[in-house]
Amino acid sequence: MGPEVVYLVIGVGLLLATVMPHVLRHRALSAPMVVLSFGIVAGVVVPGEDPISPVLNARATAHLAELCVIVSLMGVGLAIDRPLHWRTWAPTWRLLAVAMPLCIAGVALLGWWAMGLTVAGAVLLGAVLAPTDPVLASAVQVPPPTGEGDAMVPEEDVVRFALTSEAGLNDALAFPFVYLGLFLLGRGPIDDWLTQWVLWSLLGKLAVGAVVGWFAGLGLGRMAFRGSIRTLRLAEIGNPLFALAATFAVYGLTELIGGYGFIAVFAAAVGMRSVERGHGYHKELHQLIEHLETILTLGILLLLGAAMSAGLLLELSWTSVAVGTALVFVIRPLCAWISLWGSTELVGHERFAVAAFGVRGIGSVYYLAYALSSEYVAEGLELWGVVTFTIVLSVIVHGIAATPVMRWLDDRRVSPPKA
C-alpha cells in the first residue's frame, strides 16, 4: 500500500468524522460506527499488505492510543463541573470500588474457564477490558462547557455524570491490574512481588498521580484565571493551546516521577475547572481538546477497522465471542447494578442506564498494546481477537442505543410519570 493510498483513506475517514456527527445527530447511529465500518471496507478493497496492524506494531499502537487517552481525559475533566466531594461523587466511587473489580474478576474467570487462557492471560484480559469510554457514545457524556456560567451538570442528571466521571478515573485504575497480569507472566512466585504490587503499583502510583494532578491543576488554573502577572492570565488572552500544554506537562511530570499519568491528567482538568467554574475560557479549552480527541479516536477506529479486515480477528473463536458478548450484555450491567444498589442518587431506570452503558474503546486498545509491547504473551493474538470484537460490539450496541435511551431519560426527567 503506497503512502498516497494511506493519505486518501485517512482523508476520507476524517472527512466522514467531520460530517457524520452533524448528519447523525439525534439518530440511533454514531460517527464511530460509520468510521469503523469504512475502515473495514477500506481494508478489503485497498490492495497491498497491512502495514498498520496493531499486532505487528504494538509499540506504535500503544503510543497513538496513549495520546488519544490523555487528550480524552483532559476533555472529560474540563467538562465535569460538579464539585469534588465524597457525597456528590458517590455513584462514581461505587462504580469504581465495586463494579470495576467485579468486572475484571468476571472476565478473568470466563477467560480462564471458557477460553482456556492461563491465569496471567485471563487477568490481563480482565484488566484490558476494564476501562470504559463514553467518548464512543457521546450521548452519554456530560455536556461541554457553555462559557455562559451555567455549564454545571444538572443535579438530577446523575446518569451522564456517573458515566463520564467513571470513565475519567477507570482508565488509570485499570493499570494496577494490567501490571498484575504482567507480574504473573514474568516476575516469578507471587510471594516475591505481591507486597510491591499492592504498596506501589496499586496504591502508591495512584496516590502520586492523583496528588500531582490535582495540585498541578489548581496551580495552572490559578495562574490562568487569577495570576498576579497579567501576561500569565491566559484566560484573558484566550489561547486554547493552554489545554494541550497542561495535558502533556502534567502527564510527563507524573510519569517521570513514577505515578500514573492518566489519573493525573484527569485530576488536573477537574482542578483547573474548579478554580473558575463558569468562565468562558473553559469552552475554548474544551473545544480544542474535543477536536483533537475526535481526530485521534476516529483515526484509531479507522485503523482498527482496516486491521480487522486484514486478519486481526483470525484467532477469534466462539468462546472468545461468548466472553465479549457476556461482558457487554451480562457482566458489566450486572456488576454495575450491584454496585449502585441502594444508591439514593439514582432511581431504578437510571441505575439501569448507568449499568448498561459501559462502553469499551480506546483505553482497551492502549492497555493491550502496552502489555504486548512490554512482555511476551503467547496468547497475544487471541487477546487481540476478543478485545477487538468486544470494542466493535460495544461501539455498535451502545452507539445505536445511546441516543434513544438518553432521550427517554431526559423526557422522564422533564415529565416524570404519574404515581
Image: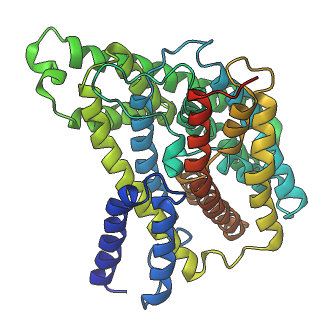
Residue 222 visible somewhere in the drawing: yes
Residue closest to the far left: 231
In front of the other: 319 or 351: 351
Q: Position of residue 11 (x, y in %)?
A: 29, 71
Quadrant where the N terminus lies?
A: bottom left
Q: Is residue 34 left or right of residue 247?
A: right
Give the image quarter of residue 146: top left
Q: Relative to residue 391, is residue 216 drawn left or right?
A: left
Q: Is residue 306 visible?
A: no
121 up-or-down from 313: above or below: above
| Residue 285 left/right relative to 324 | left
The answer to which image quadrant residue 409 occupies is top right
Rendered-image quadrant of the C terminus? top right
Which residue is at 60% across, 75% downward? 312
Residue 401 % position (x, y): 62, 53
Taking the view exactly as shown, the residue that stands out farthest to the bottom is 47
| The residue positioned farthest toward the front in the image shown | 418
Q: Residue at x 47, y 74 (%)?
A: 39
Vertical placement of 19 versus 306: above or below? above
> Which quadrant of the figure has residue 320?
bottom right
- Model colouring: rainbow
Residue drawn at x 16%, y 33% as measured from the top left: 239
Q: In the depicted view, which residue is nearer to us: 282 or 264?
A: 282
How many marks on residues? 0
Q: Which percent across, then down, holds residue 315?
A: 71, 76
* Image location of residue 226, percent across then percent down: 21, 11
Toward the viewer: 256 or 28? Answer: 28
